[in-house]
Image (cartoon, rainbow, N blue to C red):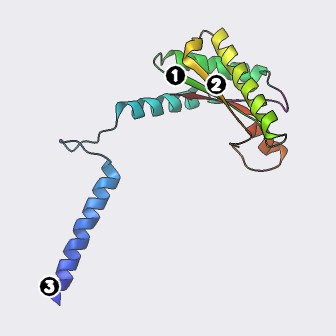
Amino acid sequence: MRLKLLTALAAATMLAACASDTASTGTTGTTGTTTTPPAATTQRSMQETLAAEAGDRVFFAFNRFNLSPDAQAVLRRQAAVIARFPQARIMIEGHADERGTREYNLALGERRASAVRDFMVQLGVPAARITTTSFGKERPAVVGSTEAAWAQNRRGVTVLQ
């Protein structure tokens, strides 16, 4: 009985040690150090830097795609951060709130993304680095049918790739 108990305890200890090593270190190289693919690290740190230093989104008024002074200020800060990452590709996502038809909101999202792209180009970001897409009302940031939720969903999001 003791032998079975000790064997089970030893097996459980070994499994726990293996599980915690994998969970805490991720993928390990031959030296035992954590390795992360450079592209993943670069993409994550660029996006995190953009969000922390400039914000990664601007907001729009209901049924509008023109940039407010606040949105223009955010985009100026974004352009300054983007200039530090000349290898980055930029995706501008246009979004709308849930009101209106799917087709209308896709078109509105595209106009919002284009407005952000055009302003970035005016600020000196090369147009060849920027692509746009519209999600319309398909990817809300906030779920709900209130003015506060709708205001958060009417947005243009800058994603560094």
Using the rendered view, name the quadrant where residue 118 is placed.
top right
Residue 146: give its label. none
Q: Which residues are magenta?
A: 58-64
Locate residue 54 relative to residue 65 in the image: left or right: left
Residue 132: give its label. 2
The residue most toward the front is: 103
Q: Is residue 18 visible?
A: yes
The residue most toward the bottom is: 1
Instruction: Give the amino acid at mark 1.
Output: Arg
Q: Residue at x 28, y 42 (%)?
A: 34
Could you say where residue 90 lies in the image, as x and y percent from the top left?
A: 56, 23
Mark 1 residue crowding within 10 angstroms, few (<14) / some (14–19) / many (20+): some
- Residue for badge 1: 89
Q: Nearer the viewer, residue 21 or 29?
A: 29
Which secondary structure lies at badge 2? strand
Residue 3: give its label. 3
Q: CA distance from mark 1 to mark 3?
A: 61 Å
Instruction: Give the amino acid at mark 2.
Output: Thr
Instruction: Give the amino acid at mark 3.
Output: Leu
Q: Nearer the viewer, residue 38 or 55?
A: 38
Does 95 lie within the magenta span?
no
